[in-house]
Image: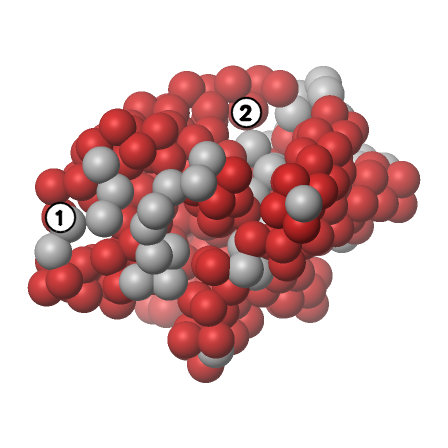
Amino acid sequence: MLTYAQAALLGLLQGITELFPISSLGHSVLVPQLLNWQIDQTSPQFIGFVVATHLGTALVLLAFFWRDWVRIIAGIFRSLFRFGIEGDAHARLGWLLITATVPAGLIGLLFQTKLQTLFGAGILVAIALVCNGIMLFGAERLRKRASTSDADAEALAKLSFGQAFFIGIAQTLALIPGFSRTGVTMTGGLLSGLSRESAARFAFLLATPIILAASVLEIPKLLSAGGAGVAFAGALCAAAAAYVSVRFLTRYFKTRTLWPFAFYCVVAGILAFLFLVA
């Protein structure tokens, strides 16, 4: 099982790499292998630890965007009582998020066991990290020009339900370690005409419910398998790093691009691959 020092390092990495488009799962798989940690990355304890660190990040996102979530949830309930979302941006945004959550949720449940075996496949994860970088390069090259750079509910609610479902399909790639949830969601958003700022905000909102749902399924398994103390330490570190990350990225994507993250993923993936096959 992980030591507290290892848990703190992985927690800090998760809090950063979950929100930066460079794959938190990829780093959680590759770092222990590159540092030759003697742990079983396919064990229930390690999987539970990873989910716990994701939970720390999700709670920070929930707190950071709490005003948005209050309005979104209220909008969903209004739409249920009115039997419509016409003229209600927050209600529409709520149903867009639900639509985009469904594909990854279903795929994750159906292929959960097979996907977890990838946690021990460092070489494949390194290749996926390179592919994630190529995807980010492609997103910048092919993105549609947004009509506005605002990232409020009005801007996000301009997405169609077909586009939201497309973003949800793209998000299923993030179930493979090495592909970034933020990266694939932003790619889908950019190709659907969102600005970088709007695509990032949609990615952060979309990450919250699916991570919370995964936590509900996996945290009880962690508690029964042991290692709750180490997981709690990792989750605290992840939460601290996520808070700094989300504050930075919500400003960064107002004026900056995905190019640095794409370059990092390609270089880091190639170096990890060469190290693991040597």
**Residue at x 62%, y 46% (from the top left corner):** 276
Question: Does residue 42 appear left or right of residue 35 in this picture?
Answer: left
Q: Which residue is mark 2?
A: 250
Q: Amino acid at mark 1?
A: Ala
- Classify 216 as above or below 88: below
Q: Residue 142 lies in what quarter of the image?
A: top right
Quick one: label 1, few (<14), some, or many (20+) residues within 10 Å?
A: some
Judge by depth and name the residue closer to the eye, 24 or 32: 32
Question: Does residue 179 appear left or right of residue 233 in this picture?
Answer: right
User: In terms of sequence position, does the residue under pointer 1 or pointer 2 come before the other?
Assistant: 1
- Classify 258 as above or below 45: above
Judge by depth and name the residue closer to the eye, 251 or 41: 41
Q: Which residue is mark 1?
A: 228
Is label 1 in a helix, a strand or a loop?
helix
Judge by depth and name the residue closer to the eye, 159 or 30: 30
**Residue at x 54%, y 24% (from the top left corner):** 250
Q: CA distance from mark 1 to mark 2?
A: 32 Å
- Classify 188 as above or below 59: below
Q: Amino acid at mark 2?
A: Thr
- Classify 87 as above or below 265: below
Question: Does residue 52 appear left or right of residue 221 in this picture?
Answer: right
Query: Is the C-beta separation of discs 1 and 2 under 8 Å?
Result: no
Residue furthest to the right: 141
Residue 62 seen in this snapshot? no
Image quarter where the C terminus lies is top right
